[in-house]
Amino acid sequence: MDILLIFLLQLIYVPIYTLRIIFLVKEKKFLASILGFIEALIYVFGLAIIFTGEQSIWAMLVYAIGFALGIAIGGYVEGKLAIGYTTIVANITNRNDDFISTLRQEGFGVTLFVGEGKDSQRFQLEILTLRSREKEVFSIIQEYEPSAFLISYEARKFRGGYLAKSVKKHSI
């Protein structure tokens, strides 16, 4: 019975730990604090079970398996929450006004830069989006510019401009 309880505690503890770290990195300190409190309670309760029970190889294996599955669950939950913003940089070979227009009609802020590639002129689009809409942007890019060179990175802070208004409007 203790082994099953240890396993279940790990399935709860590790995702909470994962989310706490992510909330802290995303500067959501209040949520991180609440999760930290819950995490500490589960941790102490789990330790009490482990240290008062028999330390068998099976208990250790179950602990490790629960930990590994907890990481997978935490990652899955974080992916579904999709907290924060993403900046996607799309490099394309030709100016594609239909593509740019579609992105803007869908509520994405797009800034177009003209640059010099190795052999020709290139066009770079900078697109800011909620992480929850990142797949949508990639889908539009795939439809209009399947050979685009893409870079995606987390946008931690931004202020002002059309991008901020557009993204915040779609986050409601």
Image (cartoon, rainbow, N blue to C red):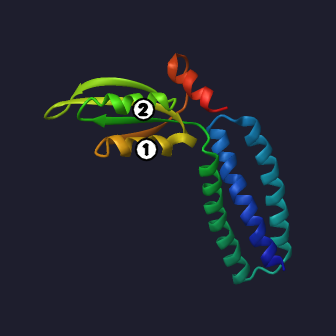
Quadrant where the N terminus is found in the figure:
bottom right
Q: Quadrant of residue 55?
A: bottom right
Q: Quadrant of residue 104?
A: top left
What residue is shown with label 1?
A: 138
Q: Residue furthest top?
A: 160
- 14, above or below 103, in the image: below
The amino acid marked with disc number 2 is Thr
Residue 42, numbered label? none
Helix, strand, or loop for circle 2?
helix
What residue is shown with label 2?
A: 102
Quadrant where the C terminus is found in the figure:
top right
The amino acid marked with disc number 1 is Phe
The mark closer to the camera, 2 or 1, is 2
- What residue is drawn where x is 79% and y is 59%? 43
* Left-right relation of 145 to 87: left
* Left-right relation of 84 to 12: left
Given residues 20 and 126, the one toward you in this image is 126
- What residue is drawn where x is 51% and y is 23%? 163
Between disc 2 and disc 1, whose residue precedes? 2
Helix, strand, or loop for circle 1?
helix
Image label count: 2
The percent coordinates of residue 66 (x first, y second) are: 69, 70
Measured in 3D between alpha carbons, the distance from the residue under mark 2 to the one under mark 1, in whole angstroms, is 13 Å
- What residue is drawn where x is 67% and y is 78%? 61
- 151, above or below 172, in the image: below
The percent coordinates of residue 58 (x first, y second) are: 71, 82
